[in-house]
């Protein structure tokens, strides 16, 4: 089967979070199962085009009464046909969504409308004729809408559309005054259901237009149909409930493998975990903490946004003391963190690093450090307010690092009492209690802890099962059930 992905992120070319990892490894797995996979993304300024083939034919992408001239590059990589849409002013900036993680470009509606319409024009120009067009989150939410409005009577009309919901907290809101950036008239916007509460809402349009909807975990598929998780769209999600399903993300088990991970100072396996102690010691030294084997080490790798629990960890709202300061003062443990995001939170983290002898953090982004923290920590903290799937807890499990998580979304679907610790209530006090339990386990029940590490490392969160589920879903909506399902089957 031929599947066309359209995405704003794909690891390692463009990444702000787990979306990039999930898209890359799903695409790769589908290709390794014998499918043909094409993927369109923007050529951001950070993508070095020297290793790509430049194609001389330009595309004229229609957006309302204007046509935007767009170039494109091609590269074959890991079994995928990659197409990078090139428009220097709009897509060629170095940031994906903004100049920094805390800021958005003002014209994102236009930028991602260009990507969405451009991908369909490219598919048409190259006669790609995919059976499935699969798009991801608000940046490519316009694809199923454009497909329904403008491509039904073209060779692309046969394709079915899939819209993946990685994070309902971002819906592509924009003021109605910017509607012209989508190229749609007011009548078309209304017909597509893109207006909601007096503004544009791209995700709402995609919920209505796409042939099928996938949330990135079964629990999250149910949660988004309820007010606390719907961000204003729970009713629409429930209305579309018949075509909404939840499929858990997998992880790239080659990239995240403690037996082969080249970012680590020592490697280890489920059977022989001695290297993990060396990773811990090296990590403590790297972060300037005393290399004490007897002190439990808690790690975090995170975007610093409300979703990830920074309110309870670092904020001062709600009257309770933020939990991380209290934890570091009262509990016999060390905490190491890497993250970027909200400026107030970055500032508080830098202050804490100066003030607390058992807390050390790096405000920044580093893949290699993320691997070393995941391997060297005893516990991995994710007190998310909501978590569609979450990949970090899956990486932690694979590295024998015990996740300490709130029971929500994909965290609830992947961590249980045999492999992790649950934060019973999302609050500073709830987080403190869970880490008290972690310290108790570490000191008083080391055998139980080792058993949990063993069980965690034995769990399989690779892509095989999820890719099979996607394949069945594609088969069901296209009627193409005879698609390749085992490695080595030839392309259609
Ligand atoms: P989300 O996509 O909501 O941020 P996930 O758990 O799905 O959460 O994925 C986060 C991904 O981003 C992981 O691959 C994680 O390692 C990575 N990541 C997040 N922040 C950083 C950082 N500061 N440095 C390195 N990697 C990071
Ligand atoms: C989003 C979600 C995260 C999920 C990732 C990949 O960024 O916040 O929970 O794991 O997408 O699907």
Image: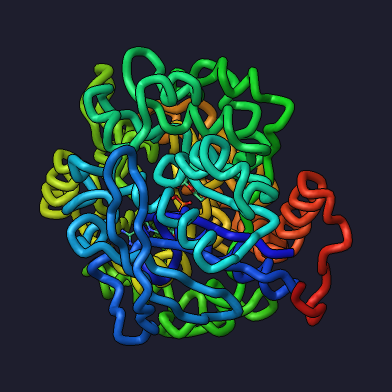
Residue drawn where x is 38% and y is 83% of the image: 52
Residue drawn where x is 61% and y is 39% of the image: 215
Out of 300 and 196, give the one closest to the viewer: 196
Locate residue 361, reporting x and y percent.
24, 58
Which quadrant of the structure image shows residue 250?
bottom right
Number of marks in the rendered image:
0
Quadrant where the C terminus sits is: bottom right
Which quadrant of the structure image shows residue 358?
bottom left
Locate residue 272, reporting x and y percent.
64, 80
Q: Is residue 457 left or right of residue 263?
A: right
Out of 207 and 73, give the one closest to the viewer: 73
Position of 266 relative to 292 (above/below): below
Out of 80 and 132, give the one closest to the viewer: 132
The outermost residue toward the right is: 482
Q: Is residue 462 left or right of residue 180?
A: right
Out of 104 and 320, give the one closest to the viewer: 104
Locate residue 464, reporting x and y percent.
74, 64
Ligand 1 positioned in quadrant: bottom left
Residue 136 can be seen in this image:
yes
């Amino acid at each position: 089967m031929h599947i066309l992905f359209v995405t704003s992120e794909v690891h390692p070319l463009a990444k702000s979070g787990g979306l990039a990892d999930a898209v890359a490894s799903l695409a790769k797995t589908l290709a390794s199962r014998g499918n043909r996979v094409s993927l369109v993304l923007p050529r951001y300024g950070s993508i070095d085009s020297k290793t790509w083939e430049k194609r001389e034919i330009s595309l004229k992408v229609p957006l309302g009464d204007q046509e935007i001239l767009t170039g494109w590059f091609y590269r074959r990589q890991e079994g995928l046909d990659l197409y990078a849409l090139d428009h220097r002013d709009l897509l060629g900036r170095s940031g994906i969504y903004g100049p920094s993680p805390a800021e958005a470009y003002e014209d994102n509606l236009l930028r991602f409308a260009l990507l969405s319409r451009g991908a369909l024009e490219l598919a048409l120009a190259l006669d790609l004729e995919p059976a499935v067009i699969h798009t991801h989150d608000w940046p490519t939410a316009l694809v199923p809408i454009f497909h329904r409005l403008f491509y039904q009577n073209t060779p692309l009309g046969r394709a079915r559309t899939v819209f993946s919901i990685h994070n309902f907290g971002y819906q592509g809101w924009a003021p109605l005054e910017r509607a012209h950036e989508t190229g749609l008239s007011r009548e078309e916007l209304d017909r597509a259901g893109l207006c909601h509460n007096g503004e544009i809402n791209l995700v709402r349009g995609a919920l209505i237009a796409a042939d099928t909807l996938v949330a990135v975990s079964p629990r999250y598929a149910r949660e988004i149909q309820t007010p606390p998780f719907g961000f204003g769209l729970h009713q629409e999600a429930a209305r579309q409930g018949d075509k909404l399903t939840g499929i858990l993300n997998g992880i790239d088990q080659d990239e995240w493998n403690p037996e082969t991970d080249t970012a680590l100072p020592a490697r280890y396996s489920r059977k022989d975990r001695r290297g993990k102690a060396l990773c811990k010691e090296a990590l403590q030294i790297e972060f300037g903490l005393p290399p004490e084997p007897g002190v439990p080490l808690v790690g975090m790798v995170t975007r610093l946004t409300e979703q990830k629990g920074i309110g309870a960890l670092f904020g001062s709202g709600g009257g309770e003391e933020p939990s991380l300061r209290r934890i570091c003062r009262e509990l016999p443990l060390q905490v190491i963190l890497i993250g970027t995001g909200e400026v107030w939170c970055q500032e508080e983290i830098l202050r804490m690093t100066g003030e607390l002898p058992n807390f050390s953090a790096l405000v920044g982004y580093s893949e290699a450090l993320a691997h070393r923290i995941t391997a060297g920590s005893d516990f991995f903290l994710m007190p998310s307010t909501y978590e569609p799937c979450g990949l970090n807890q899956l990486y932690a499990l694979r590295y024998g690092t015990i996740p300490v998580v709130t029971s929500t979304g994909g965290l609830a679907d992947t961590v249980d009492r045999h492999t992790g610790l649950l934060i019973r209530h999302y609050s500073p006090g709830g987080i403190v209690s869970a880490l008290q339990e972690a310290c108790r386990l570490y000191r008083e029940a080391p055998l139980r802890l080792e058993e949990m590490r063993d069980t965690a490392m034995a769990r399989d969160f690779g892509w095989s099962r999820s890719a099979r589920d996607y394949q069945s879903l594609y088969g069901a909506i296209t009627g193409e059930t005879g698609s390749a399902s085992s490695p080595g089957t030839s392309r259609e």
